[in-house]
Image: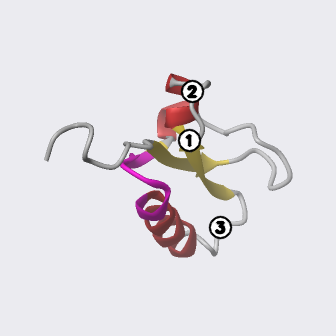
Amino acid sequence: MSETDSPKQLLHLVFGGELESPEGLTFRDLDELDIVGIYPNYAEASKAWKAKAQATVDNAHMRYFVVHLHRLLDPDTTA
């Protein structure tokens, strides 16, 4: 399969950590961020995010995020 035949990679980063406040977006300790991984599409990233979010549901300060890396790498491209 050539590059033109394969689906476009839409990279997504999943990461998380403990926030200073459940209402905020400031992490308590950047050295403790959990970099879950980089995924080739949103569906795979969403599965990883959901697993991590559910595993840490008892900690109200713990949050996981999905970052659309493809939008940062190529902002002119639409998915």
Circle 2 sits in a helix, a strand or a loop, which is it? helix
The residue under label 2 is 72
Circle 1 sits in a helix, a strand or a loop, which is it? strand
Q: Nearer the viewer, residue 30 or 49?
A: 49
Q: In this picture, is 18 found above or below 74?
A: below
Amino acid tagged 2? Leu
**Res. 11 image quadrant:** top left
The residue under label 1 is 68
Q: CA distance from mark 2 to mark 3?
A: 30 Å
Q: In this picture, is 14 found above or below 2?
A: below
- Going by the image, does 4 lie left or right of 53? left
User: Which residue is depicted at the point 61% across and 24% down?
Assistant: 76
23 is within the stretch colored magenta: no
Specify which label sits upstream in the sequence, 2 or 3: 3
**Res. 10 image quadrant:** top left
**In contact (CB < 8 Å): disc 2 and disc 1:** yes
Circle 3 sits in a helix, a strand or a loop, which is it? loop
Q: Nearer the viewer, residue 75 or 12?
A: 75
41 is within the stretch colored magenta: yes
Mark 1 neighbour density, 10 Å: few (under 14) some (14–19) many (20 or more)? some
Specify which label sits upstream in the sequence, 3 or 1: 3
Estimate the x, y position of residue 75 in percent, counting from the top left.
61, 25
Q: Which residues are magenta?
A: 35-44
* Nearer the camera: disc 2 or disc 3: 2
Residue located farthest toward the left when viewing the structure as drawn: 1
User: Which residue is depicted at the point 56% across and 41% down?
Assistant: 68
Amino acid tagged 3? Asn
